[in-house]
Image (cartoon, coloured by chain):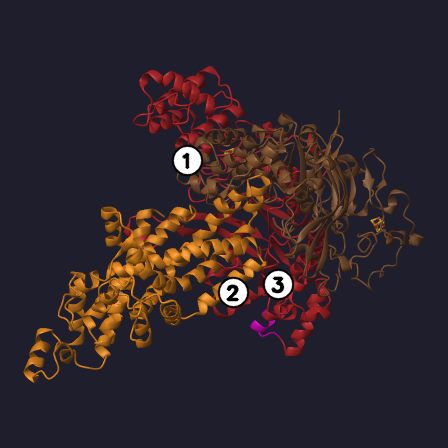
Chain colours: A red, B orange, C brown
Amino acid sequence: MSVDAPLVRVDGLRKYFWENDSLLDRLFGDEPVPVRAVDGVSFDIHEGETLGLVGESGCGKSTTGETLLRLQEPTEGRVEFDGENVYDLGGAALTDFRRRAQVVFQDPFSSLDPRMTIGDIVRQPLDVHGVGTDTERRERVRDLLERVGLSADQIDRYPHEFSGGQRQRIGIARALALEPDFVVLDEPTSALDVSVQAQVLNLLDDLQDEFDLTYLLISHDLSVIRHVCDRVAVMYLGEVVEIAPVEDLFADPDHPYTRALLESVPRASTDERERDRETLAGDVPSPRDPPSGCRFRTRCPMVIPPDDLDIDRETYRALMTLRQRIEQRDVSLESVGGDDQFTIDDGGVPAADVPAFVAALKDRLLAVDLPERHDAIVEDALAELATGDWDAAEDRLRTAYESVCERDHPELGDGSHPVACHLHDDAIERTPAPDSLD
Amino acid sequence: MSMAKFLVRRLLQGIVVIWGVVTIMFGLRAVAPGDPANLMLAEGATQELVEQVRREEGLDEPVYVQYLDYVRELVTGDFGYSWQSNREVEAMVIERIPATIELTIAATIVALVIAIPLGVISATRRNEPADYGATMFSLLGISTPNFWLGLMLILVFGVWFGIPYPTFGLSWVSLASISVPFPSVGFYDFPTGRRPVGFGEAVRTLVRYGSVYDLLVWLKHIALPALTLGTYFTALITRLTRSGMVDELGKPYVTASQAKGLPSVLVRYKHVLRNTMIPVITVLGLQMGTLMGGAVITETVFNWPGLGLRLIDALGTRDWPLMQGIVVFIAIAFVTINIAVDAVYNYLDPRVSEQ
Amino acid sequence: MTEEILRVSDLSTRYFTQEGQVNAVSSLDLEIERGEVFGIVGESGSGKSVTARSVMDLIEPPGEITDGEIRYRNPDLVEAIADDHPNAIDGEFVKLLELPDDVRRSLRGTSFSMIFQDPESSFNPTLTVGEQLAEAVEVQRRASATPRSTRARTESAEYSLGSLLLSNVFPSRRYVSEESRDRAIELLELVGIPDPVERADEYPHEYSGGMLQRAMIAQALAGEPDVLIADEPTTALDVTIQAQILDLLDDLQRETGMTILLITHNLGVIARMCDRVGVMYAGEIVERGTLEDVFDEQIHPYTAGLLGSVPDLEGGATRRDADRRTADRLQPIPGNVPSLLDHEMDDRCQFADRCPKAMTACLEHPPEYPAGGSDAHRARCVLAEREYDEDAALSDGYFDESKRPVGDEHAEPAEPGTEPPEERPQQPAENTGGERQ
Ligand code: SF4
Ligand code: SF4
C-alpha cells in the first residue's frame, strides 16, 4: 500500500432508498422498506491511480459513484476527499470540491443538452465557476475540444450532429474544463461500439497522464476494467466483495463471485468453445431483502457446509437452493404430480398421499441424487411440507444444513487484496479449500 | 400498493377536492353582491321580515361561523332549501340526475362508437386519405363550440328537415317546430321541466306492452343533444386512439408477435388496441369535468331538463343553496368517476398495482 | 452430412427516408447449413438486424427488400405450394421473396422464429407470459392441423375480428385453447423456469430479465422452427445471466438440432456459439467463413480491427506493467461508422476511408474473393488476391477532401448529414445494436 494518504477514502458508505414511506403507509402501519442500494462500502483511491468498480446491474456501483460525489446524500458513512469529509463541506469548500471532482456519464445521448452548442456545453462549468475572462474561456474551450480529439471549428455545432463516440468526447471535455483532480467515469463506453470504445479508452488513458488525473471507473465490462484500471473493487448486491490490484484479481481471483464473473465472460477467441466454465445459477436477490450473512450465498457454488457434514459441493449447493425455495415459500404444492393427482386441503395433502407426494415433490425440486442419510432428512422435511407445515420443514433443514455463510457476515478485511468470504477467514477452517473449484 | 390503500388514498384526495369546491362556492357567495335575505323574500318585504330571516338563517353571524355551519350541514347531508321555490335542494338535485346521466352516457357511447374505429383506421392507414379525413374531422370536432354546434343541429334538423326539437328562447326555431304534427308527444312538456319519457320508462313500455314507441321517442329526443355533447369527445378520443396506437404499433412486442406468426387481427386488436385503450381511459376520466361542463351548455341549448339546466336557472335567480347543491353533486360525481377509472386502469394494466 | 437450409443471394434492403435512400443491406450473400449456428457480427448500423428481419419478412415501410433471393429448403413446403405458386419453387428450395405475403407470414413461428434483444419490451406488458406463449403454440397447432395445403395453412392461421369479439362471450371461440396453455407450461419448464404453472400466470414485469429471455426462447421454440434467429439475445443481460442463456441455447440446439442464426456485436458470444461467422460492415458481409477462418486467419482489415479493439481478458500486458504505454494500447479502428445514405456512398470498398491498408485498387468496389483457410472462407477485400503494396497505398489525407479525415486523435468534422447513422430514427431496426448495453 502506498504510504501517502489516499485522495479519496470511502468509509462505510450506505445509501438506502425508501419504499412505503408515505404518510398513508404509516397510517396503514406498513413498515418502510429500505432498498439497500449501497450497504457499507469502503475503499481508498490513491492519487494518480485508476480504481475500477465492477459489478452487474443493480449492484450499486453507479449509486456509489454518485453518492461519493455528493450528487446524492448518503444514508450513512463518510467520504474523505483530500482529507476532508465531503458531506461536511459547505460554501467555498464545497464549490472547490465540485470543481476538483467531476463525472462523465454513460449515456452520451441524454447527458448533453440538445439545445446548447458543444462550445456552450463545455464552457458552462467555466461560466458557473467564473473562471477567466470571456476570451480566455473561449480559448480554453477550443483547446479542450482539440485535446479530446475534436476540431475547434466544431465549437458552434449541436450535439445531435455528432456520433456517440464524439459526444462522449464532448462529455469528457466538459468534465475536464475545470482542471479537476478526480473524475468518476460512470460506464463511459458501454453505449459505444467496440471500435469507438477503444478510441475513447485510449483517450482517457492519455488524458490521465497529461492532466495527472485520478479515476474511479465504474463499469460492468471486465475487459475494459482490466485494460484501464490499476486496482479493482468488485461489488455484489450493495457490498464490495473483493479489492485487488488488477493483475492479481484477473490472474488469481479469490472471491467465488469474482471467479464466476470472470468465467462468465465469453472470450473472443477460437478456444472459447472448449473453455470450461461454471455458470452461476439463479438471479441476483432483491436489495429490498438481501440474504443474511454472505449476500452471495444464494448463488455461491462454494457455499461452506457445516464441518461435520460429509457432502460434496454440488449436492450441498442443491440442498441450499432447495432450502431457499422453501424459506421463500417459492414452491407450489398445487402443481405437484400430474393433473389433479393430489388434492390439497388446508394447505396440505391427506395423510395417505404423503409418501407419493413427497416422492413427486423431491423429483421436482432436486436434480441430484442424495446420499442415504441426507435423503432421509430431505424426505422428512418434504413430508412436513406435504402437511402444509412450512416452518417445520424450514427448521428441519436448517438444523441439518445451516452454513456459516448464512450466519455470519464475512468482512472485507485489510491488506492489499481483501476478500469478503469465509473461505478466506483465518478464523474458520477452510473447508473445502478454495481452489477445489479448478 | 394494495388495492385498499390505493382506494383510501384516492378517497382522501377526493374529499379534499370536494372540500375545495365547497369552500370556493362559499367564498363566492360571501363576496357576491346582494343581501341573501332579500333574495329569499319576495320583493317589497318589510325590513322586520328581512331582519328576521337574517337571524333565522344565521346571516348575521361572522362569516367563519356561517362557513363552519354550512360545512357541518353538508357533512350531515343537509343541503338546505332553495331560496326560490323553498323546496329541499336535495330533492331538486336528485330529480334531475337521471336526465343528465342519460345524456352523458349517451354522449360517451356516441363518442366511443365513432371514435375508436376511426382512430384505429387512422392509425393503421397512416398518411392515407382515411387518416387525413379522420384528422380533419377531429380537429373540427375539438374546435367547434358546443352551443354553436347544438344550435346548428337544431337549425338543420329541426327547421330545415322539420324534425321538432325542444328549444331555448329562439322563437324562430320554436315556430318552425310547432308546425310539425307528429310525433310531438311530450314536446311541450319540456318547459315545465319534465321530459316526455325517460329511458327507464321507455324500457318499461317495451317490456310491458312490447311497444317500441316510447323508446323511439326517447331516442329522437336524445339523439341531437348526445351528438352535440359527444362531438368534442369523439374528436378527442379519435386523436388519442390514433396516437396511442401509432405509439403502440412501434413497440418491440408488436414485432415479436408478428415474428411468432400471430394473425394480424390478434396483434392489432387483442394486443395493440387493448394497450392503447389503457391511457385513453385515463384521459377519459380526466376529461369528465369537460363533459359535465359541456352538459350544462348542451342542456341549456336543448332545454334538456337535467342538472345543468337547473344550475343555469339557479344562477339566473341567484339561488345559492341550489347552486351549491348542484355543484357539490357534480364534484362528487367527478371524483367518483375518477376513482372508478383508476380502478379500471389498475385492472387493465398489471404493472400499476405493483408500484 | 451438410445441407444448406437457407441461401440468401444478392439481398438488398433499403430504407426510403426523407434524408434519402439508406442502403441498410447491400448485395448480401449467405448460406446457412442445417443444424449449424451461423453468426453475424457487426457494429451498430452495419445492417445485421436488418438482414435478420429481411429473412423473417419483418421489414416495414419505409424499408423494402429491393433485390435478391432468399431460398429456403423445405421439400414439404415445396409440395404444398407446387400448384399455387410454381414460380416460387427451385428444386427442394422455396424462393421466399416470390411467395405472396400470406404464405410468407404463415412461415413465421413454424419455419422461422426469432428472439429479440430486449426481453422486457418484447413481451406485451398487459398479458400473462403464459398466454403469450400459448399464442405461439396455437399458431403452430393451427398450422400443422393441415400442413399440406397452404390455403388451409394461411386460412386456419387467420382469425377474424368477429371471432375475437365473440371470444369475449364464448370461451370456445378463443384463439388460444387449453391444450396450448398446457404446452406453454411445458415449454417454460423446458427452458428451466422453476414452478412453470405459477409463472405462466404472471406478467412480464414480474420476471427478471434472464427469466424473461428464457420465456422468449420458449416462445420461439413453440412452433418447432427450422431456423431460430436470435437478434442480440444477450445484449441486455448481465454477464452471469448471459452465460446462462448461452448455455441454454447451446443445449437446446444440441437437443433439437435446429439451425440458429445469431446476430450480435459481441465477438465473445460469437466465439462461444458459432460454427461459422459473417462479419458485416456498412450493409455488406465483408468476410465470412468458419470461426477459425475469421478469428485466426482473417484477411479483411476490418475484421482484424474489430478483434483488435476488444480489450483482452487474459494474457498480454495490463497497464501496471512497466512500459504500459506501448504494451497495452488498444488498436482501435480510426474514424467512425460510415454513412449509409446512398448519395454519400461511393462505389468503392466501404472501409477504404478507415482502412490502414487502402490502396488504389480499393477504389473499385471489391467482389467477394475466396480467401485461404476453409472452402467457405470469403473476403470482400483486394488483399485476398494480392499483397499489400506500399507504393499503391492511398495517401493519408486521401479522403479528407471529399469525406472526413482519418485518425484517432482528430476525428472527422461532422458535416451535417454525414454523421454516422448509428442512432438515426430512420433505421428503426438498427438502433438495437451495440449502442445499448
Ligand atoms: S462466504 Fe460462503 S457463500 Fe459467501 S462467497 Fe464465501 S463461500 Fe460463498
Ligand atoms: S479492399 Fe482495400 S480498403 Fe477495403 S478493406 Fe481491403 S485493403 Fe482495405
Quarter of the image for residue B317 reads bottom left
Q: Position of residue C428 (x, y in %)?
A: 63, 52
Give the residue number, with chain letter if any, for mark 2.
B136
Res A79 visible: no
- The subunit letter for the residue under badge 1 reads C
B163 or C280: nearer the viewer? B163
Look at the image and give the residue range highlighted in magenta: A125-131
Which amino acid, mark 2?
A: Met
Q: Are marks 2 and 3 in contact (CB under 8 Å)?
A: no
Q: Is the residue at mark 2 in contact range of ligand 2, meaning its CB lies under 8 Å from it?
A: no
| Residue A130 among those drawn in magenta | yes
- The subunit letter for the residue under badge 3 reads A
> Residue placed at 29% from the left, 27% from the top?
A346
How far separated are the C-alphas under marks 1 and 2?
A: 40 Å
Q: Is the residue at mark 1 in contact range of ligand 1, meaning its CB lies under 8 Å from it?
A: no
C29 or A66: nearer the viewer? C29
Whether residue B349 is situated above or below residue A333 in the rendered picture: below
Give the residue number, with chain letter if any, for mark 3.
A175
Say whether residue C382 is left or right of residue A399.
Answer: right
Q: Are marks 3 and 1 in contact (CB under 8 Å)?
A: no
Give the residue number, with chain letter if any, for mark 1.
C171
Res B317 visible: yes
Whether residue A73 is situated above or below residue C171 in the rendered picture: below
Kindly indicate whether the residues beneath marks 3 and 1 are on one polypeptide chain. no
- The subunit letter for the residue under badge 2 reads B
Q: Position of residue C420 (x, y in %)?
A: 71, 57
Q: Position of residue B355 (x, y in %)?
A: 41, 49
Which amino acid, mark 3?
A: Ala
The local crowd at label 3, few if under 14, some if 14 to 19, many if 20 or more residues have their Cα within 10 Å, is many
Which amino acid, mark 1?
A: Pro
